[in-house]
Structure formats: structure tokens, C-alpha cells
Image (spheres, rainbow, N blue to C red):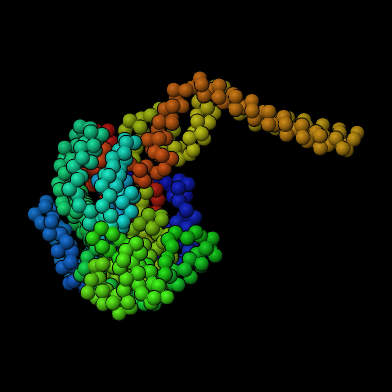
Amino acid sequence: MITRSINFSDTSYFSKLVLNYQAQEKSVQPFYQYPNTVEAIEQIIFDKQKENIDRVAVSNSIQRQYKSCLGLPQFDVVQQHILSFQSQNSFCIVTAHQLNILGGPLYFIYKIAQTISTCKQLKESYPAYNFIPVYWMGSEDHDFEEINHISVFNKKVEWNDKQGGATGRYTTQRFAAVLEDLKTIVGNDKYTAELMDIFSKAYQQDNLSNATRYLVHALFGKYGLVVIDGDDAELKQQFTTVLQDELLQQHAAQLVNEQIDKLESSGYKQQAFPRPINLFYLGENSRERIEYTADTKRYVVLNTSISFSRDEILQEVLQHPERFSPNVILRPLYQQKVLPALAYIGGGGELSYWLQLKPLFEYYKINFPQLILRNSALLVNAPTQKKIDKLEWMVTDFFQDIEQLKKLFILQKTEDDVDISGYKKEIETTFLKLQDVAKKIDGSLINTVGAELQKTLQNMDAIQKKLIKSVKQKNETELLQIEKIKNQLFPNHSLQERVENFSPYYASYGEAFIQDLINAFDVYQKEFVLITLNSNKQ
């Protein structure tokens, strides 16, 4: 594996807000609490220690969630971390994600690998503390269409079994056909059998939350990663005061909207939209928004017959906190409330909505964590790298639009000179002289000469297009090769990590692929990573 990196700004795939945050520009500084540096961690530890976190309850809740994983290889490493939550010198670095089937797009795997790598780096800098990598499962999300498919070799593998409600509670009884489809597409590579065994055992678990925990543990358990499910009554019991305040006072909408106004006045776009009440009500197969109806003075669960008076819903929170599900605005607050978390690692979109939330954290006196933009990465296999080398190009060239790439090839690799800019300049010079002549004879002819110049330049452009088309036809094979490489590196005109699944890479390289990712990532480096894979990985 060969690793290089480039600036995020050189990719054209990241927003102004994210780039300015990475650069710690002054315009963004009011929206976060700590700089995204290793050196800031010591201050964050000092501040987080002031919070009253029930560490024993957190540890006990996680142990209970892991019952289905008892006896798994490497569980003892995770168990040590789970128990260490009880220690006052233990803290965690968190990433979160939906329960995408089969590991989802590559960046799901990247986020977790980077969380582990970050903890290793912090342990080296602060050996007196324990740093626990945590994956917080987005098990309460109900957008099944976002998580029910993956892409492998540009082929879609899909789970068509919409059951309704929180996806973490979905039964996996009818998942076997998905694995058969995947096996057919992945093919028979060196580690295919190992990969399919992991998937098979994972999706024999009773629901999607447990299946995802098993899968992630199989891939990352040896590194001590702790998987936490927020759909948990004991954890939510620690969040009940916030739940009740949100129902009664609805501070989140006001505070977040005020922050959004400040962001927009600084030239940044809104990422997440707060509602008057930022809670859902969880049923067996439903997750519906809660609204307050002023006319009846009742809290209504949309699309159901369920409603509560003020006293009834407050009692419901105390007796059944697991039935109340935070939306995107309150989930970060919930996570930070119950965990001794120092930093959050997320993608550009995630960091954008976290930057809307600082006043909300301040109101509830919960420490706003360090925000770390996850590394993005581009994987280049050995055959693709050879093709790029043959073109005498670099991987970074392929961040350009496909038409720009084709034009670059035509200009650099053919003997035919189709760049007519010099001829156009000569024509413009001639017409300017002609305008001087016209001005002396009849000033009204100047506009006529100018109009003819524009027509001529347009005709020249048309001629250039025909020349380029002719050259393209002569070099059709090479241009098709360029297009194929572009599609491999940027499928569907998107970043590879947002489309492709990790399965083909694991099938080829085994668990060494995971280890190499952990070694390659350094989120504090603040750059986009380019990874060239070896052709003969052992």
C-alpha cells in the first residue's frame, strides 16, 4: 500500500464551510469550541471531567448490549474497554453512522478505522489516559431506503424487506437471499470465503442492530472498538431531563435557528432543520414525529391515534424513555450527555450540522466536543495504477471532469494541434485594426465590424470542436480507457467512498486491508488520502 495525500480544496468535493473549518478560518471560529488539533485534547479532558457522567451505568448498558457477542474472538480486548468506561481517566472518541447493510459505502469503514487510529495517536501523546474508540449506531433512523443497498462492481445488492420503524429493530430473518446475491457478484477471490462467513454469522443475529454490532466487531474488535446502541432504555434514562425540557420548553428550535442565522450571515448554508419538537415516538414498527397542538393542549404522535396530555407525556418519558427518539438536532446532545466523549469524527455534512448546535450544548451545560473531519480516501488498485502510469498521468489528474481529461489527452498525446487560441488572437488583432480603419471612414461601421468579429470567433470555435471530434475518433481506444478509469475512481460522478462497498477489497486482501486503513489514516493531518493498493498482498 502506497499512501499520499492532497488538500481537500484540490478535490472540488467539499463545501466552503468544511474547507474553512479545516483551515480554522476566523469566520468559522464562533461556531465551535476547540481547535481540531492534538494539542487541544488536554483542555477538553479538563473540561469534560467537570460533567457528572454515570460511568458505571454506561459500562453496564454496553455490557448488556454485547450479550450476543460473548465468546467472539477478540472480545476480551473490547471487554477491557467496556469496563474502563468506569475509570475517571478513560475517555472516548466517537463516530456515528446509520446501520447500512453489509458495511454500506466505504466511508462507513473509513470512519471507524480513523476513530481507532485517532485513539492510538492520542494514547501516544497522552499516555496517562485511556482513549476508547466508539462507534455509535444510528439504530433509530427510519430511512430504510438509505441503508438497504450497497454497490459492488457497479452492481446493486439490495434488501427489499421494509418493515417500518427504527431500522435497528428490523428482523434479519429474510436476509439470506441478499448474501447469495453478494457472493455471486464478489466472485471467488482469496478471502471471499472468510468475508462471506463473517457476513453469514452477522446476519444470523436477530435484528439489524445486533447484526451490525457483530459485523463491526468481526472487522474491528481486535482493536478494541466499542459499539454502542443509542436505542437503549438505561442510556435514555440519563437523558430524561432534556427530553422533558424539549417537550415543555422547546429551546432547541430557537437556539439552533439563531445559530443558523449567524452561519447564513457569514455566507454558509443550513445543513439540518430544527422542528418545534425534535423528538420521535418509537413504536414496534413505527417512528413518528411528536407535535404539540395548542388548541387541544395535547401532544400528538403523527400518523397514529396516540396523544398525551402534558402530565401524561412527562410520565411517559420517566416510565418509558426508550420510546422517545432524538432527531438529528438532539442526537449529538444525547450522545455527549451519556458518554465521556472528547471528540466526534464525521463527514462534511455531519460537521456542518454540528456547527449549528453549539448554543444548544451551552444551554444544557454539556461540553461541545472537538469536531474532526474524517479523512476521505481514494483507493487505486494495481491494474488501474498501471493504466494511469501508461498514460503518463497522476491519480490526481482524475479529479477533473471527464471532458477536461479527454481534452488534456488530446492536447498532450497527439501530434495534431487543435489549440486554435493563437489563431483567434491573430484574428482579433486584425479586426481591431479593421475597426480603426472603419472609425476613420465611418464611425457607424465600428459596431458592424465588432459583430463580424464575434461571428468569426464563433465559427472558429465550431471548427475547433470538429477538429477535436476528429482527433477523438482517431484515439477512441485511449479515450475509452480514460473514461473507464474515471468511472472506476469516481463512480456515478461521485467520490468512490460514497458509492462502493468494502467487500471486493476485503475479498482480495483480507483483514490486512483493515489494518492498512488504520495505519494510513490520520484525521489531524487534514488532507485527502490517496491509497495505491499492492498487487500481490499476502
Left or right of 423 on screen, residue 11: left
Residue 99, percent from left and from top: 27, 53
Q: Residue at x 24, y 67 (%)?
A: 322
The quarter of the displayed image where residue 282 is located: bottom left
Left or right of 194 on screen, residue 97: right
In this rendering, does residue 520 appear at all? no
Residue 369, percent from left and from top: 35, 67
Counting every numbered tag in the picture gives 0
Nearer to me, 430 or 236: 236
Q: Residue at x 42, y 75 (%)?
A: 295
Residue 510, percent from left and from top: 20, 40
Q: Residue at x 44, y 59 (%)?
A: 271
- The image quadrant where one finds the N terminus is top left
Looking at the image, residue 194 lies above or below residue 75: above
Residue 364, percent from left and from top: 35, 76
Nearer to me, 136 or 110: 136
- The image quadrant where one finds the C terminus is top left
